[in-house]
Image (tube, rainbow, N blue to C red):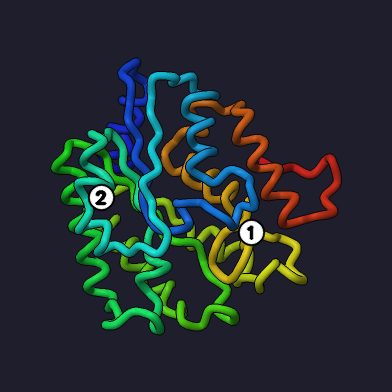
Amino acid sequence: MTDDASALREIIASDAPLTWVMTGDSITHGLIHTRGARNYVDHLHELIRGDLGRVQDVVINTAITGWRADLIVEDFERRVAEWRPDVVTLMIGTNDCTTVWLDPIIEVPAFEASIAEFVRRVRKLGAIPVLQTPPAADLLHAPDRERIGEFAQAIREVAEREQVILVDQYARFAEYSSGTGPGNEGQPWGLLDDAFHPSAAGHAALALELARALGLDAVVPQSRVLTDLSARVAVARHPHWPPELDVS
């Protein structure tokens, strides 16, 4: 367990109100592709301020569709610092890795440097940084994102080097499937709404993985929110699942 993980456990166990800032690109922004359902930040909001009973906590989503790590670093004051956070999560890389509509193309070392700088600035605020890899993409329908695995690995390496809490969404989604096409045709698990944006069920999966990495599932082992999210993911992956199917 990292020092950050221990520190997070301590502040969650305290009565002190916390400010959680969650930032990133369109996946964290969470518009359109959930089809009106809650995104993963919304689920964490309900878990923290509902099941955990931390009603004085504030959960803020500052993500912007289309953004990249370098843009967030440039706009760090507004995206992060202005909110005086205690915990900051970053999910990024899906746009950074494209080889088509960026000029110049972002290389992996430059991306990794931006992630490391983000961590440094979060720590300077006295907050706990949390890094999330982006979910795996459907490369058949998004070939310009073919480097996304390399960018996910860069995030892992920064997390290991800087001893940051890591939420490996890429690895989790890769376990479920190699990806689906637009609309999830022919795919029973249905965690993507298009080639790289998670669906409502995909956001449930993101929320589950984030909650587990933060240790929130251990704080409320009988969480109504987590039980519901687990069921949503199970149904998406196994649409004809029997009632007795274990969704834990």
Q: Write down the residue under mark 2.
A: 163
User: Number of marks in the image?
Assistant: 2
* Amino acid type at image mark 2: Gln
Q: Secondary structure at mark 2?
A: loop
> Given contact means CB atoms under 8 Å apart, are the residues at marks 2 and 1 in contact?
no
Residue 92, given in percent of the width and then of the height, sits at 37, 60
Residue 212, given in percent of the width and then of the height, sits at 49, 41
- Residue that appears at 46% across and 77% down: 145
- Distance between the alpha carbons at the discs numbered 2 and 1: 30 Å
Choose the circle earlier in sequence order: 2 or 1: 2
Q: Label 2: few (<14), some or many (≥20) within 10 Å?
A: some
Q: Secondary structure at mark 1?
A: loop
Q: Is residue 52 above or below residue 23?
A: above
In which quadrant of the rendered image does the C terminus lie?
Answer: top right
Q: Is residue 84 left or right of residue 233?
A: left
Q: Label 1: few (<14), some or many (≥20) within 10 Å?
A: many
Which corner quadrant of the image does residue 83 belong to? top left
* Amino acid type at image mark 1: Leu
Q: Is residue 163 left or right of residue 66?
A: left
Residue 123, given in percent of the width and then of the height, sits at 18, 43
